Amino acid sequence: MSGWTLKRFWTRATAEPAEGGFAVLLDGRRVKTPAKAPLIVPTQALAKAIAAEWDAQTGEVRPDTMPLTRTANSAIDKLSVQQAEVVDLLAEYGGTDLLCYRAEAPQALAARQAAGWDPLLDWAATALSAPLAVGGGIIPVPQPAASLAALRSQVAALSTFRLAAFHDLVAIPGSLVLALALINRRVTAEEAWSLCRIDEDWQAELWGTDEEAAETAALRQAAFFDAHRFYELCR
C-alpha cells in the first residue's frame, strides 16, 4: 500500500460473501489490492474488521492506520506467489531461536529467562516433537535436524493468510517457538510480548528507560498485537 494517495470517496464500507471467501466493499464496489487483485479474505470476521478500518478513514486515507488491510494485501499480492520462500525464512528461526540463548550472568537474569522460556521449550519438545538445545551467550547452538524439520512442518501447514500474520509473530520477537506457542494458545499475546522482552526489561530495571528505545518498542509491540489480531480473525 506504499505510494498511495487516496482520499475518502465512499459513504460506507461493508463485507459480503464472495467466491473464495469474503469481500470488502466501498459503497457496493469491491476493494482491490495494490496489485489490482480482488481483496478476498478467508473469514467474515476478518472482512468486517478490514471494512471497519476503511470506515475509520477521514479525509486522506492513511495506510499506516490500516494494519489488517496491509497484511491482507501482502497475503494476496506477495505470499500467494512466495509462500515456499516465506516458510523457509521463518523455519530458519528455529535454528537461532531467542529462547535458546541465555545470559551467563547475572544469575538473576538467567533464572528469569529459565522461568519464562523453559516451559515453552518443554512444550515444543513434547507437543511438537521438537526438543531444542540451550546455550549461554551468543555462541551458535547446534539444533537437532529432526527438531528443525518438525518446526518447519508446523510453519508449512499454515494457510497463506495465517502465514502473513505469523511472519511478524516470529520476526518481531525472534522466536519461532514463542510464535507457535502463541497461535496454539499456550500463551496470550501480552504474555508472549513480556517473554520476548525479558532482557530489555531487565536492562530498563537496572539503568532506566531510554525514551527512543521505548518508542521503538511501542511500535514493535503494536505491530505484534496487530499481527496476532489478524491471525485470530483468520480462524
Image (cartoon, grey):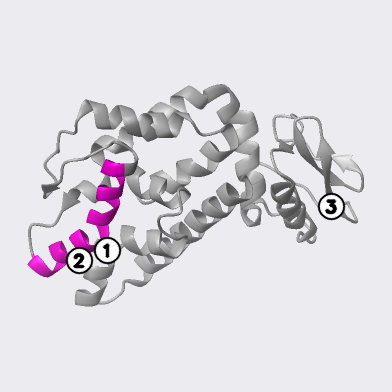
**Which quarter of the picture shows residue 40?**
top right
Residue type at numbered disc 1: Ile
Q: Is residue 83 left or right of residue 54?
A: left
Q: Which residue is mark 2?
A: 112
Count of picture labels: 3
Q: Residues within 10 Å of mark 3 (few under 14, many from 20)?
A: many
Residue type at numbered disc 3: Ala
Q: Find residue 198 and name its label.
A: 1
Q: Which residue is mark 3?
A: 13
- Decide whether residue 186 is among the magenta residues: no
Marks 3/1 in contact by CB < 8 Å: the verdict is no
Q: Is residue 217 above or below residue 29?
A: below
Q: Nearer the viewer, residue 125 or 206?
A: 125
Span colored in magenta? 106-126
Q: Residues within 10 Å of mark 2 (few under 14, many from 20)?
A: some
Q: Secondary structure at mark 2?
A: helix
Marks 2/3 in contact by CB < 8 Å: the verdict is no
- Decide whether residue 110 is among the magenta residues: yes
Q: Is tag 2's residue or tag 3's residue first in the polypeptide sequence?
A: 3
Q: Is tag 3's residue or tag 1's residue first in the polypeptide sequence?
A: 3
The residues tagged by marks 3 and 1 sit, at their Cα atoms, a distance apart of 41 Å
Q: Main secondary structure of the magenta part?
A: helix
Identify which residue is drawn at 77% across, 40% down: 22
The residues tagged by marks 2 and 3 sit, at their Cα atoms, a distance apart of 47 Å
Spot occupied by residue 166 in the image (x, y as percentages of width and height) = 48, 42
Q: Secondary structure at mark 1?
A: helix
Quadrant in which the N terminus is drawn: top right
Quadrant in which the C terminus is drawn: top right
Marks 1/2 in contact by CB < 8 Å: the verdict is yes
